[in-house]
Image (spheres, rainbow, N blue to C red):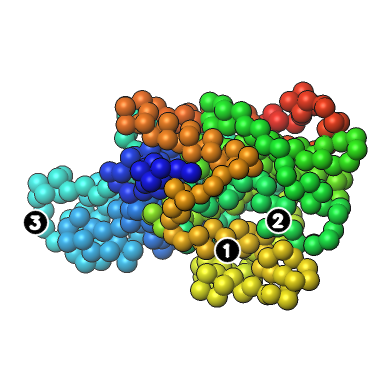
Amino acid sequence: MLKREDNERLVRVGPGTVGGEFMRRYWQPAVLSSELPEPDGPPVRVRLLAEDLIAFRDTAGTVALVDAYCPHRRAPLFYGRNEECGLRCVYHGWKFDRAGNCVDMPSEPPGTPLQAKVKLRAYPTCERGGVVWTYMGPEDKRPPEPDFEWLRAPPTHQFVSKTFEHCNYLQAMEGGLDTAHSSFLHDNRLGDTVALRSRDRAPRIAVEPTDYGYRYSSTRSADEANEYVRVYHFVMPNQQIRAMTTAPSGERAEVPKIDGHVWVPIDDEHCWVYNWAYGYDENAPLTPAFIEAIETFAGRGPDDLIPGTFKLKRNLENDFMIDRELQKTSTYTGITGLNTQDMALQEGMGPIVDRSREFLGTSDRAIVTMRRIMLEAIRAVEAGDSPRGVNPEVARDIRAHDGYVPRGGDWHTLFADELKARW
């Protein structure tokens, strides 16, 4: 159970809120690079941390992220002309570069001093791993650019997508950090005793705080001689890293990969889920067919999205197209798509969960620890200090892993090499 006041501190992300100031101390995904495919191309609307912004790729190929409205008369810059290293408002022709400087004011007399005074709010950006990242916090607190292993993997071995979710980022992220639910919500083959997470539905959770957040493990009985251990990472403030190196049969996966999510607040009641993965075997790239297969299995393949959007066809308005007969005979939920099942539960809780009404158990240890660390970080920001994990250096060399260990064996030792980044 979480106090109402602490819940509010965590879920409110707009400018001036304590949670919002905390989130702004980290680099955050703003858009996919693929949304801005060419220089001088169409601008893209962005809503991030309850701010309305516009992203555009200028003539030099660099992505700008600026206020969505012209400072002259607040006209929408979405309709602006992206030309010659700047965005020109079509209302009166005022033009701004990617740093927010007004570089042309044709509706005013030449040499007007007003031009030097006008400034469009602009945030710094960088591109890594197919994502445009931005920093929206105080300039004197700006950390180095993100440097996770998945951002360093070659394009042949990495991909990223995103999906829209109609709920607060925190409950979406808690769903990702909760490993026990996979034995139920994602049991897509009822009665199958082969799947690793169906053999033991009460995993033992261990959490180890770190400089970047924490490392945690779930341990399940596999057979008389072995246990199945999956080691994850929670990276502040909103990312999970996990492994899928073992197939459901218990054998090595055909294309072993590390994957995860970044849950990015759009505002208090909506979020983007950035879904990323990379293969770490140099000889096993992530082929387009493989990527389409895992995206479709997750429920976010090309045929699962409303055309022209990142929104699922299966959504809260149609009860995620639940099939009650399928639920009786084949799957635990009757909902198609692994991540669609997650969204059904997370969105179904309402836009913002009242955590003061919860009853938590031992399987919620990772979630409880995350909330504590996040609240500590918010207090650090309030005190003028740096929050945990703000320096990407502390998380650049981590990797997740899963596999068998002999009963009583120490996964820290047995997985030591596999838990180190190599790209």
Numbered badge on residue 195: none
Amino acid type for the residue under numbered disc 3: Pro
Residue type at numbered disc 1: Ala
Residue for badge 2: 184
Residue 249 in the image: x percent, y percent? 86, 50
Estimate how packed mark 3 is, as few (under 14), some (14 to 19) or many (20 or more) residues with alpha carbons within 10 Å: few
SS state under label 1: helix
Q: Within the image, what quadrant is residue 105 found in?
A: bottom left
Which mark is first along the chain, 1 or 2?
2
Query: In this orientation, which residue lies closer to the viewer: 262 or 203?
Result: 203
Mark 3: secondary structure = loop
Q: Earlier in the sequence, mark 1 or mark 3?
A: 3
Q: Is residue 63 above or below residue 221?
A: below
Residue 179: % across, % down = 66, 46
Image position, residue 215 (x, y; %): 62, 32
Disc 1 versus disc 3: nearer the observer: 1
Q: Is residue 62 visible?
A: no
Report the number of numbered marks: 3
Do the CB atoms of the residues marked 3 and 2 lie less than 8 Å apart?
Answer: no
Q: What residue is shown with label 1? A: 344
Disc on res. 109: 3
